[in-house]
Image (cartoon, grey):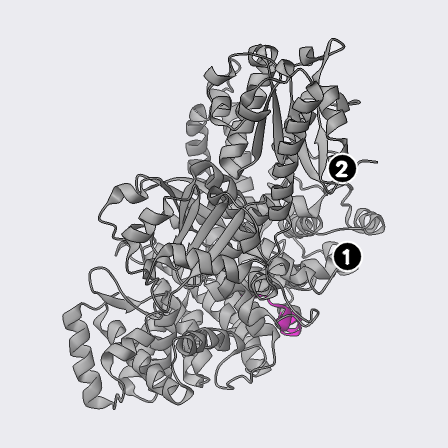
Amino acid sequence: MQNNNGLKVFLSYSHKDNEPNSPHIDNFLNHIAPLKAEGLIDEWYDGNILSGEYQQQIDQKLENADIICLFVSANFLSSENCRIEKEKALELRCKRMVSVLPIILSPCGWLDNKGISDLLATPKDGKPVSDFSNSDQAWHEVYTRLKNIAMNELKIKHLALKDDFKNFLQDTEMLTKANSKKEKLFLDDIFVPVELEKYVDYKVDEKVSSDLLVDNLLECKRIIISGEAQSGKTTLCKKIYSDLRDLNLIPVYISDKRNRFVGKIENFISASLDEQYENFENIEIDKNRIIPIVDDFHYAKNKEKHIDNLLNYTHSILVVDDIFGLNIEDETLISSFANFRIKELKPSLRYGLVKKWVSLSDNDIVTDYQSIDKHTGLINSTLGKNIGKGIMPAYPFFILSTILAYETFSISLDQEITSQGYCYQAFIYFYLRRNGVKNDEIDIYINFLTELAYHIHEENKEELSPEDFAQFMVSYQETYNLPIKEEIVLSNLSEIVSIDSFRNYSFRYPYFYYYFVAKYLSDHIDDTKVIEEIKRILNNLHQNKNAYISIFLTHHSKNNRIFEEIEGVALSLFKKYRPATLTKKETKFFDAQAHNIVKAVLPPSNNNPEKERMELLTLQDELEQSNESVEQSDEFPENDNFAIELRRAVKTVEVMGCIIKNRAGSLKKAELEKLFEDGMDIHLRVLSAFFDLIKDETNQNEIVDFIAERMDHLEEIKDTHNKPNLEEKKEMANKLFWNINYFVVCGFIEKIIHSLGSDKLLEIVKKVCDEVDTPASFLVKHGILMEYNKNVRISEIAGKNNEDSFSAIAKKAIRLMVINYCTLNRITYADRQRLNSQLGISSKITIPEQTHEG
């Protein structure tokens, strides 16, 4: 029986060297039998292949080998296959220190062979096995050499980490006790790969998953990883450490932020090796096998000296806050380093992190998806992704801490703010306490930050120059007592208030700034000047900064004047239109074109919701990436009143949605109902304005003609021989026009659902929508039930579909909602049968591309 716990030894040889007249491989196998019997090694060669993909098995075994034996002869050197295996062996030796042992079988020109001649061959002095008068003596020398290599490899492989350091590698710090279903949370429980940007010549060359960082390290030899505070640099160090150790390499983690790496780097490496490994001093180790991982290297005083010494190691990793801020005079020192920067988590990675968290406590598919979607919505809201690019970086720390802030009851909440407001406050307190601010000093710092934020807001600037900041400090100390020296205050606020390379002062992340501006407004809400500023903000919610400030304002204050002002803004938007109802009477012009609108179909019974979700997330990744590359502006042309009004409408509803979601338990029901209905009506009034535009036949004809004219430029038809004539193009354009209109209608309903919906507001939603009692409100209600409660009320939907007032467009929209739900969630066979019998929605084995609306 083969022992699978031994070192994997790969044999590379020419078949001509294992024929009856020269059975070298057979002789080798006979002599190493004791090593196999002891479980030290487990050899593999192509003679082990019984069936399957021949070359694939060889490549796989070679890639995973611990030791590679090259049986060198003239036959070996002239074989193309052996040459390829030799090159791969040398590559593995260079990349991850795989031991490569040349065994000289017979006289040949191996000393002139590049690669092999650099290695220590066996038998001793490279004397060929065939030159020995007693071949057993030759093979015994080979045996002894292989045994020594194997013994040392196994010592390294079995090198144990000390318990304290193993705990450090799995430590999740503040999240250790965060999950109610696990006594202790480990890093492996919640880690998801992050994405990094690889820089070449100071430009982004490609994006790389952190799963591939070790491959990049082994290929590039040395790498620099940069990232902001809380971006996960140390966590990444831990994962790289574990991955390198799995490859039987010897990583060593070094960090000395406090003392700034004063002293020789060799001393840090030696001391850290002793602290991290058991009995390290008893093993003979090739220095090239040691891989220093130097965390927080940007704090080092003697960077150039340390880097120069690190070049003595084949591989090394430096972790810094900014790739371009190392300030190394001799740039040749870092020219051999590949540069990577940690990116924020994109939607698919945020989903993966949330999914991993949820999986710790719930295994039911339906409940999982409900919890995953709920947490994902929470994260996007907290990050500020529902308003614009966001106000908080999408790093794992912020995402998991947000979930923790919502789920934990171990810290009492300030009743003056919402749970989401507490989440932001928790981050601020975390930073202050981490930087040594005492509990009795926190109020001093909070007041300072509040006044600083509002001063920047009043100045209408994004940052303060040194002169501006000095003036602020004079003004502040004239008004308030500041018993702490300015330099100490700024040092303790270094992770909240940033001083850039040009000595300008600003808040490091937007959420800090918006939080404290809103706090100032809330604290001074009885001031007439402040009330006027609040009114100005609420009347200009089309500007992102005003939208964010208003959300934080409602975290800090319960003053009814704020809500009255918001309601006044809501009623003023598109006020000349009545809310759309989607009744037959209203959409008669649209229903006449229902036959031109594509029909959504139920996905096949073998539909994979997870695959569908990932495809949707990939699209969201691309959309978010495109938004990142475009500078968002709050400025609009003065004469574009419609664009400003439309943006005001969208942003106002988003703000109202944030308010009712965050204050679902602290606002009176009547106030929640009023805000929800006002928010829904805004979008439905915009939809009425849209109907006014498209039901005009003149407008219809102009748009259809325009689309038809542009069809010759479409890639699908411009190169075809059978080009459509003018009448056919108009017919195609007409179908396209009405399908676009249909998706605009669906888009407005979806916008209401996602802006105003929440699992905490289901009773509010049902009460308001049932009282409004229109097909439009019916769609909103059931969309929210599907999205936030994972509840599809088939009988209720079927009953409404049969009512005379329900328009064809509304029926198509509710059908699409149900089908989209079924696409993204697991549906049983019995439930599919109900959909078919009650709603006429049947499964298809395949979905024609032109009819897939999901």
Query: Which residue extends farthest top?
Result: 21
Residue 662's place in the image compared with 632, above or below, is below
Residue 537 shown left or right of residue 354 in the figure: left
| Magenta span: chief secondary structure | helix
Element marked by disc 1 = helix
**Residue 692 drawn at (x, y percent):** 47, 52
Q: Which residue is the site of mark 1?
A: 794
Please name whichever residue, 22 or 41, is drawn nearer the observer in this view of the structure.
Answer: 22
* Foreground of the two, 372 or 676: 372
Apparent side of residue 257 relative to residue 591 in the rendered image (left or right): left
- Taking the image as drawn, is residue 651 in sight? yes
Q: Which residue is disc 2 drawn over? A: 844
Q: Quadrant of residue 562?
A: bottom left
Mark 1 surroundings within 10 Å by alpha-carbon count, few (fewer than 14), some (14 through 19), many (20 or more): some
Is residue 613 shown above or below 270? above
Residues drawn in magenta: 755-768
